[in-house]
Image: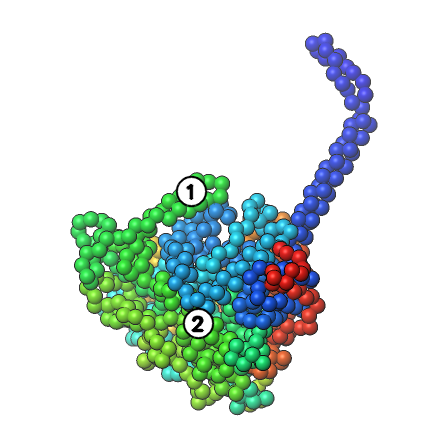
């Protein structure tokens, strides 16, 4: 080190290169020490939030000790002296492994996400808050029967005991720089309300689209494009519903409608996957007369959005039978963190599984103004004023927003239609029946009759309920509340002001649609129409999924010889044959004539790939992906041309809400009526070839060769933790592997990168030891836990793994406070 003279005569230090290197090295070492200390501190904090799995804990609220045994996958078996103590322990393990997930679900149900994650969630909070579910949940808790409330309070106590026992909060709160808020009894109901948002159309989008279609294009076109069913219908009771007649040119003639300017979309604006993926599921039950051991077998795989952690949490609950204290009840299956019941599973006498019904559980009501005060409206009893409660949305790091909700006698105002008329959402979720605890009755049910009775009394989003019992019998019904409509079928928006239409109450269990001991010994559902006639009347039409998946399940079941076992039914769950697309593959090959290929040589390569498509949604198939994309592009183009005028009237219109559009589109491309052809084409051959070229262009823009566009390259898992998309660099740590996955829509193995089987279960009640179970991710929501992803690979590969928990490797005993033993949280 030396000094040198500056221009103004002063001196400054001069550092030698050697000294600079030493200082730089020292700073680097210091930085590494600081970084290592930060990593050590972070790792230490994360480990502090890992759950306690062994030893004893004193928990206030218990009446007797409870044992929590965990197996090698972290699946708990909870053994208690009564159902209330078991509920407390269930809340305890849910909070230990999944509290952040529970927190997100209660906040979604309440419209309170912004206080946790900031203004980015404000749009969601506005959408959810207008239903005022926290207020409804509090009222429901206050009105609960004593025993129901006692069970809920026990669960709540267990959740908060686990929070208190943690040495550090779950890691997500460290990342968000906030603290977890204790659980409240109404929060459990909010988790159920969150599932209503997941499974129902809380914005009335389908009714709105159908209403617009009816108003703009007329009833004939509406019935044709939004039919009750198609030739793919596969109900357990009834037949396919014939498609209405094709509208003639006197009703709709696209050649004279001058909509070409609305249809100038470029090929790259299309996507090979329609933007709407309705939540759905499969379930079926096979009577004992067809099985290898004489017991009925249930298969259930519920299809939902996939995330980390998985929506379900496995558990086995064991407690004395109150009706026969000398015997134990054991209920095993999947639970929903935040809720004190088993959602789907087996109690050793019955096994049950669920699929979304797509019945009609919402109605859009068009309000009639009074002509004076803008805050009044017409009702059957005269003029009424809106209730105008104020809702405060707290925002992390920002100023709170106050919104005013307009409440009517039917429900909240949610929007205005294309004519500027206010609309109200009438939704079963707003009624106290929506969140009753009738599902608890399934724990005690011993026969299909007792099971369907309990299901009909349960408060949940209405589900197709399939059940098998230990005597070899099977049944189907709807679980959840069903309204009684009068004056209309519920599909179209309209005024209720004159009292000629509306809801007059609720079905009683004896009025529910039921199928018990069907002649063929099998029941099935795949979000399709399950029944017809009077049984269908109460359920209504809320956008049933196309029946192709249900047909493939039914046909696969029919192909099985008697002697069916669990692995046979798992094979159906994993069936990825593209039977639905076979006719589209033939159509594509018929379109790619020698003349068409000669006109554009690129079409020849496509034809070769399609000829050798393999007929499966296999990860290495290119032809499957090409056929699928061609079908989606052509369907999109046909529907856009037919409904362009609807989009012009209301930009919110989305033809993807027409779930049964396969029927009318296939008829059009088969019969090829000129008056319903997009006017930018001279004939249907030209439109089909345009869809072919759109398909080729789409893949050539994304791949160097068409042969590289495998289905696995598109259908690659993106199963992510909610925080990973906001925290760059942590995805490899928080998210599941990017596995290429077989399967698709319209086949039993439903699969997309972010959607699919949230569980697979095959079980015969009373013979659970032979049962099979899969679940993506793992039991734990903590990335340092060995159970964060240890069940995932079996789910990816379809490898059979046991339904029942394995031998215990950890034992945690919860002790009542009056014992004076153990540590206290």
61 with respect to 26 (left or right)? left
Where in the figure is residue 604, as x and y percent of width and height? 53, 67
Q: Is 681 rendered above or below residue 385?
A: below
Residue 158 occupies quadrant: bottom right
In the image, farthest residue toward the top:
9
Where in the figure is residue 650, as x and y percent of width and height? 31, 55
Distance between the Cα atoms at labels 2 and 1?
38 Å
Where in the figure is residue 372, as x and y percent of width and height? 17, 49
Q: Is 43 rendered above or below residue 765?
A: above
Label 1: state its secondary structure: loop
Colour pattern of the rendering? rainbow
Q: Residues within 10 Å of mark 2 (few under 14, many from 20)?
A: some
Residue at mark 1: 400
Report the residue at 20% width, 62% height from top: 380
Q: Quadrant of the C terminus?
A: bottom right
Report the residue at 72% width, 11% height from top: 10
Where in the figure is residue 429, as x and y percent of width and height? 38, 63
Residue at mark 2: 438
Label 2: state its secondary structure: helix
């Amino acid at each position: 080190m030396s000094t040198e003279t500056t221009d103004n005569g002063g001196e400054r230090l001069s550092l030698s290169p050697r000294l600079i290197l030493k200082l730089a090295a020292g700073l680097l070492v210091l930085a590494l020490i600081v970084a290592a200390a930060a990593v050590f501190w972070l790792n230490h904090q994360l480990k502090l939030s890992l759950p306690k799995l062994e030893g004893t804990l004193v928990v206030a609220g218990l009446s007797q000790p409870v044992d929590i045994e965990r197996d090698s996958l972290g699946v708990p078996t909870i053994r208690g002296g009564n159902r209330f103590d078991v509920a407390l322990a269930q809340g305890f393990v849910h909070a230990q492994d999944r509290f952040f997930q529970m927190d997100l679900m209660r906040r979604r149900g309440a419209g309170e996400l912004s206080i946790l994650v900031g203004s980015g969630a404000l749009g969601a909070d506005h959408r959810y808050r207008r239903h005022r579910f926290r207020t409804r949940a509090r009222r429901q808790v206050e009105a609960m029967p004593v025993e129901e409330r006692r069970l809920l309070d026990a669960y709540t106590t267990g959740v908060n005991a686990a929070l208190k026992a943690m040495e550090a909060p779950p890691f997500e709160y460290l990342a968000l720089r906030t603290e977890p808020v204790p659980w409240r009894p109404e929060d459990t109901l909010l988790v159920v309300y969150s599932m209503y948002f997941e499974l129902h159309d809380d914005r009335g989008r389908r009714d709105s689209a159908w209403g617009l279609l009816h108003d703009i294009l007329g009833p004939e076109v509406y019935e044709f494009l939004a039919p009750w069913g198609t030739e793919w219908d596969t109900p357990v009771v009834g037949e396919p519903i014939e498609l209405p007649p094709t509208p003639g040119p006197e009703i709709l003639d696209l050649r004279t409608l001058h909509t070409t300017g609305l249809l100038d979309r470029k090929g790259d604006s299309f996507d090979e996957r329609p933007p709407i993926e309705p939540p759905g599921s499969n379930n079926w039950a096979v009577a004992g007369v067809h099985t290898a051991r004489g017991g009925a077998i249930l298969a259930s795989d519920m299809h939902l959005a996939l995330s980390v952690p998985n929506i379900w949490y496995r558990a086995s609950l064991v407690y004395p039978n109150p009706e026969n204290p000398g015997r134990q009840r054991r209920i095993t299956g999947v639970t929903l963190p935040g809720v004190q019941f088993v959602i789907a599973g087996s109690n050793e006498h019955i096994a049950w599984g669920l699929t979304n019904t797509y019945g009609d559980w919402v109605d859009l009501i068009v309000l009639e103004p009074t002509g004076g005060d803008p805050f009044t409206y017409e009702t059957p009893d005269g003029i009424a004023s809106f209730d105008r409660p104020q809702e405060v949305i707290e925002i992390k790091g920002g100023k709170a927003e106050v919104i005013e909700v307009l409440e009517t006698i039917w429900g909240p105002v949610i929007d205005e239609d294309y004519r500027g008329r206010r609309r109200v959402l009438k939704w079963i979720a707003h009624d106290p029946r929506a969140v009753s605890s009738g599902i608890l009755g399934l724990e005690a049910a011993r026969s299909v009759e007792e099971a369907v009775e309990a299901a009909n009394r349960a408060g949940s989003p209405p589900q197709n309920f399939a059940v098998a019992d230990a005597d070899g019998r099977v049944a189907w019904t709807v679980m959840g509340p069903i309204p009684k409509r009068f004056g209309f079928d519920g599909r179209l928006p309209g005024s209720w002001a004159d009292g000629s239409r509306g809801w007059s109450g609720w079905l009683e269990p004896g009025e529910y649609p039921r199928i018990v001991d069907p002649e063929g010994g099998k029941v099935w559902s795949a979000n399709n129409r399950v029944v017809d006639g009077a049984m269908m009347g109460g359920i209504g039409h809320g956008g049933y999924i196309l029946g192709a998946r249900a047909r493939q399940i039914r046909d696969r079941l029919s192909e099985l010889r008697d002697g069916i076992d669990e692995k046979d039914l798992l094979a159906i769950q994993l069936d990825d044959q593209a039977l639905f697309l076979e006719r589209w593959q033939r159509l594509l090959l018929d379109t790619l004539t020698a003349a068409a290929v000669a006109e554009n040589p690129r079409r020849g390569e496509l034809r070769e790939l399609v000829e050798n498509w393999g007929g499966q949604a296999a990860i290495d198939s290119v032809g499957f992906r090409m056929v699928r994309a061609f079908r989606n592009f052509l369907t999109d183009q046909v529907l856009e041309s037919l409904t362009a005028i609807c989009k012009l009237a209301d930009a919110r219109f989305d033809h993807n809400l027409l779930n049964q559009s396969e029927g009318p589109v296939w008829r059009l491309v088969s019969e090829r009526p000129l008056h319903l052809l997009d006017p930018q084409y001279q004939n249907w051959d030209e439109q089909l070839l345009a869809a072919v070229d759109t398909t080729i262009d789409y893949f050539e823009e994304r791949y160097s060769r068409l042969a590289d566009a495998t289905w696995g390259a598109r259908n690659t898992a993106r199963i992510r933790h909610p925080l990973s998309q906001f925290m760059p660099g942590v995805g490899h740590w928080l998210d599941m592997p990017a596995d290429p996955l077989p399967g698709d829509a319209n086949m039993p193995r439903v699969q997309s990168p972010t959607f699919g089987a949230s569980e697979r279960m095959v079980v015969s009640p009373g013979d659970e030891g032979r049962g099979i179970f899969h679940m993506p991710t793992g039991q734990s929501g903590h990335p340092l836990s060995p159970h964060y992803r240890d069940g995932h690979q079996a789910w990816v590969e379809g490898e059979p793994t046991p339904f029942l928990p394995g031998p215990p490797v950890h034992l945690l005993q919860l002790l009542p406070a009056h014992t004076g033993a153990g540590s206290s949280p």
